[in-house]
Amino acid sequence: MFDRKRGIRCTVAAGRHYDSASVVKVTILGGLLRQVSDEHRSMTVTEKSLADKMITRSDNDAASRLWRSVGRTRMDRFLKLAGMSHTTLGPSGYWGLTQITAQDEIELLSRYTHQNALLPDESRAYALGLMNDVIASQRWGAPAGSPAKVTWHVKNGWLPRKGRYWRVHSIGAFDGHGEDYMIVVLTQDTPSMAYGVTTIERVARAVHRTLNPGSRSAEVRTVPDDIWEKSDGSVPLDR
């Protein structure tokens, strides 16, 4: 957790590596936005469509197309410029096996939530808008327990490994009414997706409650029962 306004940073095992699952899609989006900026152009209609699907619906085909079009060279350059020195891109087309750390995910969210040379203001606003427009079934995780007064921006990932243990992750940024903080919770080898979600939301609620004592919470989670034990599809299940 990093609260820019209060100058508070609280971490546990922030340097530990995890399979990214679908949270890496925010990094792919960053690579695309940086490419567009470098080429001094606007996003194409196709790029906008793919980015929207990738973030708001966590569409894997869209992510794979952008992963290929941006390319590893540009993605590696984006990681370097963003200060994400502990992140390693997944092998070949397996973007869901990108190795991430909580520390680097905070660095990434920091680039989206504060004026910087890496991403133009228009690009940052566009990305945060997509993260605020995720479909109802993917609004769980970091937004749980957030105050009604703040605006949330979220991306989640959920992935079973070899059909047994799960990686369930949530990264979120929160702003408005003077607030400016980020929450990243990454989990490893949870016995089910539901267990991972519950764990993440307990952490998120504790953070929101501590930073906003007395504030009324806005319940934003809407999760259909049928997603609880299904992979986000970011990598083949037998890997």
Image: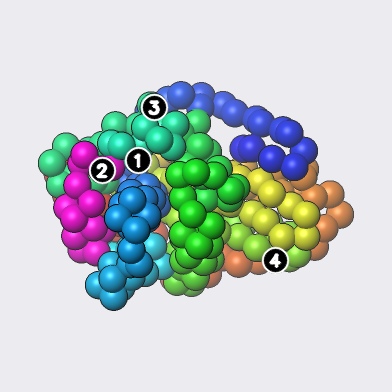
Question: Which circle's residue, 4 or 3, is located before the other in the chain?
Answer: 3
Q: Circle 4 — which element?
A: loop
Residue drawn at x 35%, y 67% as measured from the top left: 42
Residue 235 placement, left or right of 126: left
- Where does the magenta region start and end? 61-75
Residue placed under numbered mark 4 in the picture: 218
Task: Report if residue 108 lies within the magenta region.
Answer: no
Residue placed under numbered mark 2 in the picture: 74
Q: Circle 1 — which element?
A: helix
Distance CA(mark 4)–CA(mark 3): 35 Å
Residue placed under numbered mark 3 in the picture: 85
Viewer-nearest of discs 2 and 3? 2
Q: Quadrant of residue 47?
A: bottom left
Question: Which circle's residue, 2 or 3, is located before the other in the chain?
Answer: 2
Which of the numbered marks, if any, corresponds to residue 78? 1
Majority secondary structure of magenta residues: helix
Mark 3 residue type: Ser
Residue drawn at x 39%, y 27% as measured from the top left: 85
